Image (cartoon, coloured by chain):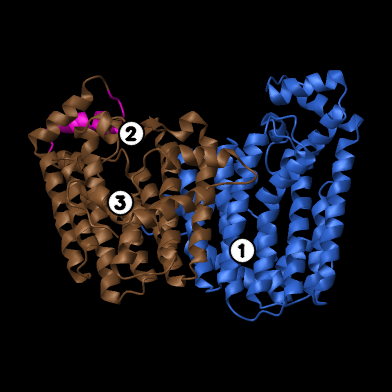
Chain colours: A brown, B blue
Amino acid sequence: MRVDTGSQNPLDRLAAALAGDLGLVNAMIRERMASEHAPRIPQVTAHLIEAGGKRLRPMLTLAAARLCGYRGPYHVHLAATVEFIHTATLLHDDVVDESARRRGRPTANLLWDNKSSVLVGDYLFSRSFQLMVETGSLRVMDILANASATIAEGEVLQLTAAQDLATTEAVYLQVVRGKTAALFSAATEVGGVIAGAPEDQVAALFAYGDALGVAFQVVDDLLDYSGSDAVIGKNVGDDFRERKLTLPVIKAVAQADAAERAFWVRVIERGNQQTGDLDRAKAIMARHGAMAAARADALAYVAAAEAALSDLPDDPLRGMLHDLAGFVVERIS
Amino acid sequence: MRVDTGSQNPLDRLAAALAGDLGLVNAMIRERMASEHAPRIPQVTAHLIEAGGKRLRPMLTLAAARLCGYRGPYHVHLAATVEFIHTATLLHDDVVDESARRRGRPTANLLWDNKSSVLVGDYLFSRSFQLMVETGSLRVMDILANASATIAEGEVLQLTAAQDLATTEAVYLQVVRGKTAALFSAATEVGGVIAGAPEDQVAALFAYGDALGVAFQVVDDLLDYSGSDAVIGKNVGDDFRERKLTLPVIKAVAQADAAERAFWVRVIERGNQQTGDLDRAKAIMARHGAMAAARADALAYVAAAEAALSDLPDDPLRGMLHDLAGFVVERIS
């Protein structure tokens, strides 16, 4: 494991430190996404998996396992499992959201069709379960099966909460814990479990992944209003057009005067959006400091993630995980 | 376990013999399809799960386990697992096929939306994995994870084979083994495995489920041309309209003269269908004896299923499984 000199960003440094393991994960992903009988499967999967995904989640698993001193082979299976679950949810999300762009490229549902995205997503889910079964660890399977259920539950909750101005920050957090943080925390937790780490370390890894995941999603939701298409790899304003109640909107709605409330009812609840509405939404959010407040929340989750790391062994990887948490919010600095 | 006098059909007799276990399965299904946070989930699931499904697949698991002398609790978990996997695939199939009716009722994608069907299907998949993890049997998890992957692979293969007149009977069988027989054979096999049955009995249970599943799907495909809406609970001719290459069509295409071939190219490959085309397709199939030939194939699979049972313990349940195989083709008598 080589330690970097510091010129790269924390994600790149983590990738460099884990380069050997990451190579094995990529080889396993390529091998397991193949299908002898249905060539459509690797086509769709390769489009997404090889489109410059950062492998953030699998790196969390690898780093957690290594940090806890793991020397066996199964952290590679678990990292691939986590990436397959993530890819499957992306395929299904893009069908659900009718998205046209992901990671700066057209989505699979646009290039092929919704059918392929649904079924190839199912295939990857099944493949992920095959991989975790190979580890032989019932506890790992339990954690990942629970995470999968929580992810789906969060997505359904998001679906029913969308367009509902009564959505609270508590409901938003439940959605975020489901759709994003559940896989982050499972990724770090299974790394500790497969390494046979003591329970306090496993709990710390869970807490780190959970807080990192929430921070990551809050930042993602902020970027949907403040980023540029090129930076976020999808279209700015997608959440607004999909009428999603994300954190800055919820904060702005909570402080809306009558005219603003009428605006939110029209664009979010009724979905009657006109040219200029996205800019007006941004102006209203700025007036109430909603973006800054959401950013402060993200920073608090970053601090919680960093604090959780104190229970883990002192190791260069721990430092990289620490810096990674800060890096997540740098995107909105 | 009470043995029936013979007045009912084999499915009802099996349900009567397994009534106690089946009650536990239904209670577990109801408990596990709940979601504290997302009430949309049990709504969608209940619509499908309580719409008069015959619980055929869970009964196969229960019967296999009981036949092999199982006295523990986990056949109930596995039967619920199998039903959840089945229900998840139905939800996703109806999105893929854009179906409007299932089991004589409007489909979930029509009553709610495609999004709910995709996500609730994902939730049930995850729930099924949670259930199988609870059994603690790695072998059972391996079998069911493999079956799930084979199902998805079969569905993707069907998608790419659809509308392709070059589809052979071998490809058709691969699709059917995936989308239908894989879950039948996994259902019977895990029943034997959880009971700790000897390997020859486990193999016999797999063979029975596999042959039964193929026969079941061939009959289903025949009914799509020869049944009535009321009997099959969906619209007759759906496969034709979806341009699926099912067994009777493949057999008729193989014997088509020039005019018939032009017809198949127009209606299946080009999808240019007009009033009367379904009747013309049926007439062409009748002329070549394609329906009768497909029915003969189904009967051969039924015979194979019956033969596989000879390796299993002599028990009233074995007799019911034997009769069930014959009953599957009675629907097209």
- Between residue A9 and residue B74, name the one nearer to us: A9
Mark 3: secondary structure: helix
Question: In what quadrant of the picture does the N terminus of chain B appear?
Answer: bottom right
Q: For the residues marked 1 and 2, what is the alpha-carbon distance in whole angstroms?
A: 40 Å
- Between residue B150 and residue B209, name the one nearer to us: B150
* Numbered badge on residue A5: none
Q: Is residue A21 left or right of residue B24?
A: left
Mark 1 Cα-neighbour bin, 10 Å: few <14, some 14–19, many ≥20? some
Q: For the residues marked 3 and 2, what is the alpha-carbon distance in whole angstroms?
A: 34 Å
**Residue A122 % position (x, y):** 52, 48
Residue identified by numbered label 3: A15
> Residue under mark 1: which chain is it in?
B
Mark 2: secondary structure: loop
Quarter location, residue A294:
top left
Residue identified by numbered label 2: A242
Residue identified by numbered label 1: B143
For the image, the number of numbered tags is 3
- Marks 1 and 3 share the same chain: no
Q: Is residue A63 left or right of residue B115?
A: left
Q: Which residues fall within the magenta stretch?
A: A256-273
The residue drawn where x is 85% and y is 42% is B294
**Residue B212 % position (x, y):** 77, 57
CB within 8 Å, label 1 to label 2: no
> Residue under mark 2: which chain is it in?
A
The residue drawn where x is 42% and y is 69% is A72
Q: Is residue B121 left or right of residue A3?
A: right
